[in-house]
Amino acid sequence: MTALASTTVANLRDLGGLPLADGRTVRPGLLLRAGQLDRMDPRTDPMVAALGIATIVDFRSTAERTDHPDRVPAGARLVVADALADTIAAAVARGGADDKPAAAQLKHILSDPALAEEHLGGGRAQTLFAETYRALVSSGSARAAYRAFLLELTAPDAGPLLFHCTAGKDRTGWAATIVLTLLGASPQTVEAEYLAVNPAVRAAFEPLIAGFVAKGGDPEIAQAVIGVVPEYLATALAEVDAAYGSMETYVRDGLGIPDAAVARLRTRLTQEA
């Protein structure tokens, strides 16, 4: 995976070049991941202009999209695929006021150490993210979102596709995991790609973390919500195994993607090393 030096898109990465089984690699220039695109500007950003993005898949919630709408390049198509709609609706129904996932509330959460400790201290942050990752596999909205994502990737006329959420680490990370597993990447490669976003995400939020800790905030809480850890990904993979037995069955039976479409995906996105 290659980090791309964009001046207007945070955490922009090309999955091309990652190793797969039988000496193959992911074909570059076709599958890109990022954080939110509210500052994307091909006119001033040569890297973005060179990508030729045909489709953008946005996994964010309604509130996230309203606060920071995507800037879509001319000629590209935007597909909204709200992965956590059911999870957020259930939280609101239980009396919660939050209409955004934790990753989209970092500035609010880390502005007040007492508030962070109340809601996320004592291991509650890890529990929250474990629940989120299970929902990314099993909730109806997540299955619909990742189905839409894979249908875009397997369309006969598909071009370069960029998928993203807010920080580009959780919902986006699970999307990358699905595709790389289908393409034949090893578990080690999948995990390494998942964790590779940490430096960019933590650098982006370093001033926020420093301010939070300076005010007496628990650095473990900050790290739990800022970055990703192997345990989060393992939770989602365990949910797949428990509910479906394998990623292929999850994609076919859980997401409704036919085997022929997966075969097209493998042909299109892989190349000889």
Image (cartoon, rainbow, N blue to C red):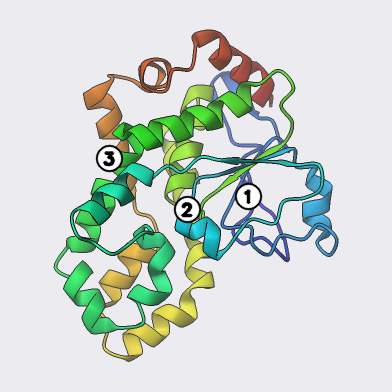
Point 54% across, 16% down: residue: 262
- Residue labelled with disc 3: 134
- Residue labelled with disc 1: 13
Position of residue 250 measured from the top left corner of the image (x, y, whole percent): 36, 21
Position of residue 202 measured from the top left corner of the image (x, y, whole percent): 47, 68
Q: For the residues marked 1 and 3, what is the alpha-carbon distance in whole angstroms?
A: 25 Å
Q: Are marks 2 and 1 in contact (CB under 8 Å)?
A: no
Point 83% across, 48% down: residue: 50
Above or below, 159 against 220 in this view is: above
Q: For the residues marked 3 and 2, what is the alpha-carbon distance in whole angstroms?
A: 21 Å
Mark 2: secondary structure: helix
Estimate how packed mark 2 is, as few (under 14), some (14 to 19) or many (20 or more) residues with alpha carbons within 10 Å.
some
* Image depth: mark 1 or mark 3 in front: 3
- Residue labelled with disc 2: 62
Q: For the residues marked 2 and 1, what is the alpha-carbon distance in whole angstroms?
A: 24 Å
Mark 1: secondary structure: strand
Label 1 amino acid?
A: Arg
The answer to whether residue 191 is seen in the rendering is yes
Specify the quadrant of the image occupied by residue 227.
Answer: bottom left
Q: Quadrant of the N terminus?
A: top right
Q: Residue furthest top?
A: 260
Q: Judge from the rendering whether residue 51 lies leftward or rightward of residue 87; answer left or right.
A: right
Q: Judge from the rendering whether residue 95 lies leftward or rightward of residue 178; answer left or right.
A: left
User: Which mark is first along the chain, 2 or 3?
Assistant: 2
Q: Quadrant of the C terminus?
A: top right
Above or below, 14 against 27 in this view is: below
Q: Judge from the rendering whether residue 112 lies leftward or rightward of residue 270; answer left or right.
A: left
Label 3 amino acid?
A: Arg
Point 61% across, 62% down: residue: 10
